[in-house]
Image: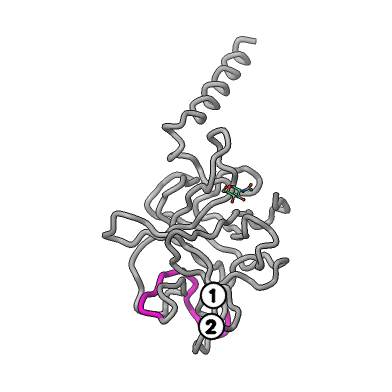
Amino acid sequence: MFRESLFALFLLSAFSSSLLPLTTAQDYVLDTDGHAVENHGTYYLLPAKSGSGGGGIEVAATGKESCALTVVQSLNEDSMGLPLKLSSPSITTSHFTEYTSLSIEFTSAPAPCSSASEWTVVKGLPEGRAVKLNDYGNTVEGDFAFVCAKREFYRCNKSYQLIFCPYGLMRCEDVGISIDDDGNRRLVISDGNPFLFKLQKVGSSSSA
Ligand SMILES: *[C@@H]1O[C@H](CO)[C@@H](O)[C@H](O)[C@H]1NC(C)=O
């Protein structure tokens, strides 16, 4: 009896402390099941809203590229895209919070001619700064992170914007989607115009 009520008290206090607005910046990033996203876990990045014109995230050869080096949103709304590993080397915990610096990589190097699978931001492109694979060159040093799009009763509504934080700058920038002349939906730095994602654990069937 006593143990049970202590446990209930513990649950209550754990729950209410997570409701404090002051602690919201420390909130874990949540997947579509409502579980905290695992550091070094594998997830699909899907559009927060269906019917937005595309599916999950994959790679494509855009512009003059002879290899698939550009990170894009699939043109197929039903596609989950490719699994992505989300890792923060700087934390020792098994889960990460909003604003935690992350590297993002495809779990397998996309065939046929890229050996790289990690995302970088490349500058000096005609289309501005865009998300590419890391053997592209001319990269902007920095990290990615997720930030909740909106809180409902202090809990994230499970839609996240992806931000890119260049080293040495005091601010981060939004990652958005830009459609090129060939119809590719490229991930680009698009400050003030973030694309909203949800994170679905690979192997989970929940997409809600
Ligand atoms: C979460 O809130 C954002 C901002 O209002 C909205 O665009 C998005 O669709 C919401 N996500 C869900 C799953 O309701």
The span picked out in magenta is 110-125
Name the kind of residue labelled 2 in the image: Thr
Left or right placement of residue 74 versus residue 166 in this view: right
Residue at the disc numbered 1: 109
Residue drawn where x is 41% and y is 80% of the image? 136
The quadrant in which residue 81 appears is bottom right
Answer with mark 2 or mark 1, whichever residue precedes in sequence: 2
| Image location (x, y in percent) of residue 194 | 50, 59
Name the kind of residue labelled 1 in the image: Ala
| Image location (x, y in percent) of residue 172 | 37, 57
Separation of disc 2 and disc 1 at Cα? 17 Å
Left or right placement of residue 61 versus residue 54 in this view: left
Residue 133, compared with residue 200, is above or below; it is below
| Image location (x, y in percent) of residue 46 | 62, 60
Residue 89 lies in the magenta stretch: no
Q: Secondary structure beneath disc 2?
A: loop
The label nearer to you, 2 versus 1, is 2
Residue 204, compared with residue 27, is above or below; it is below
Residue 74, compared with residue 63, is above or below; it is above
Residue 115 lies in the magenta stretch: yes
Q: Secondary structure beneath disc 1?
A: loop
Mark 2 Cβ inside 8 Å of ligand 1: no
Residue drawn where x is 41% and y is 72% of the image? 129
Residue drawn where x is 26% and y is 60% of the image? 168
- Category of crowding for the residue at label 1, using alpha-carbon neighbours closer than 10 angstroms: few (below 14), some (14–19), many (at least 20): some
The quadrant in which residue 53 appears is bottom right
- Category of crowding for the residue at label 2, using alpha-carbon neighbours closer than 10 angstroms: few (below 14), some (14–19), many (at least 20): many
Residue drawn where x is 44% and y is 39% of the image? 26
Residue at the disc numbered 2: 62
